[in-house]
Amino acid sequence: MFKKKAVLFDLDDTLYDYDPAHKAALKQVYKILKEEIKISYNKFLRLYNISKSEIHRELAGTASSHNRVLYFQRLIEKTHQTIASDTILKLYNAYWDAFLKKMKLRIGVLKTFKTLKDNCIKIGIVTDLTANIQLRKLSKLGLNHYINTLVTSEETGSEKPNPIMFLLALNKLNILPKDAVFVGDNPIKDIEGGNSIGLDTILISNKKTKQVFDYDYQKPDHYIQEIPEILDIIKK
Ligand SMILES: [Mg+2]
């Protein structure tokens, strides 16, 4: 019934919408921070973004560049001029607790995963971030039972589009590139990365990708709006 043996997915902004969860998380962090110091929301956001940019610059291309504990440490160093370790950890935990609480699967994800599993098609997740957080997200989304392998950039030491991310997932599943498709929302990380090792690539639409459809990126093999459309693409 299906011509592929595995479907690999990006996680963030492919299986759930990142922005609503991130915004809710930052609000919760601010609530806690302003119990300790007098700071406006805008100033907090500005300091958060500066801290994040600094960490990105310093750790570009690594999983740690996304580690919120480093962002909050940098932020607190700016606001408190001391290592208020209790506060840093409180903000970090509050961020992820609020984020995970707000996260919601995109439509049809669970049903599609179920269909893939019922048809013995392997499912892999290939994602840039630390394993701990991505595992927590997958638990919260209720997907663990369906996923055969997870590859994080923490695990490979490189981020997408580095081919190692895709190759390790295929290797763990014992699947050849021609027998798998890759589904993601980012034209460079997901599509150029997947194309580079000969995977069929599927670009899923979200608010961000809509803006870059016209740019001169490598083309995906398919475009979809929502996850269930992949079933038609991989049908015989
Ligand atoms: Mg993504």
Image (tube, grey):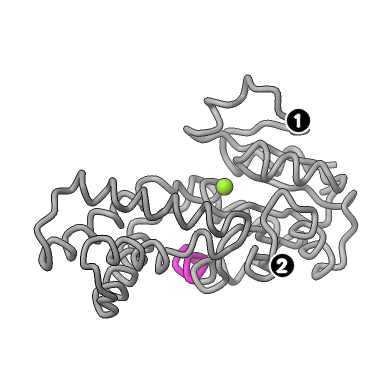
Residue beneath the point at 66% across and 36% down: 187
The tag earlier along the polypeptide, 2 or 1, is 2
Number of numbered markers: 2
Quadrant location of residue 231?
top right
Residue beneath the point at 78% across and 33% down: 221
In the foreground, 105 or 118: 105
With 134 as the anchor, is 41 left or right in this view? Answer: left
In the foreground, 61 or 79: 79
Residue beneath the point at 63% across and 33% down: 224
Q: Which residues are magenta?
A: 136-142
Query: Is the residue marked 2 within 8 Å of ligand 1, measured from its CB?
Result: no
Q: Position of residue 159 (x, y in %)?
A: 67, 56
With 129 as the anchor, is 163 left or right in this view? Answer: right
Residue holding disc 1: 218
Q: Position of residue 146 (x, y in %)?
A: 63, 66
Q: Position of residue 14 (x, y in %)?
A: 56, 47
Looking at the figure, which quarter contains the C terminus?
A: top right
Say which element carries label 2.
helix
Q: Residues within 10 Å of mark 2 (few under 14, many from 20)?
A: some
In the foreground, 170 or 1: 170
The three-letter code of the residue at mark 2 reads: Thr
Residue holding disc 2: 156
Q: Is residue 184 above or below residue 58?
A: above
Q: Position of residue 72 (x, y in %)?
A: 34, 64
Give yes or no for contact between labels 2 and 1 (Cβ–Cβ under 8 Å): no
The three-letter code of the residue at mark 1 reads: Gln
Is residue 197 covered in magenta?
no
Residue beneath the point at 70% across and 23% down: 216
Say which element carries label 1.
loop
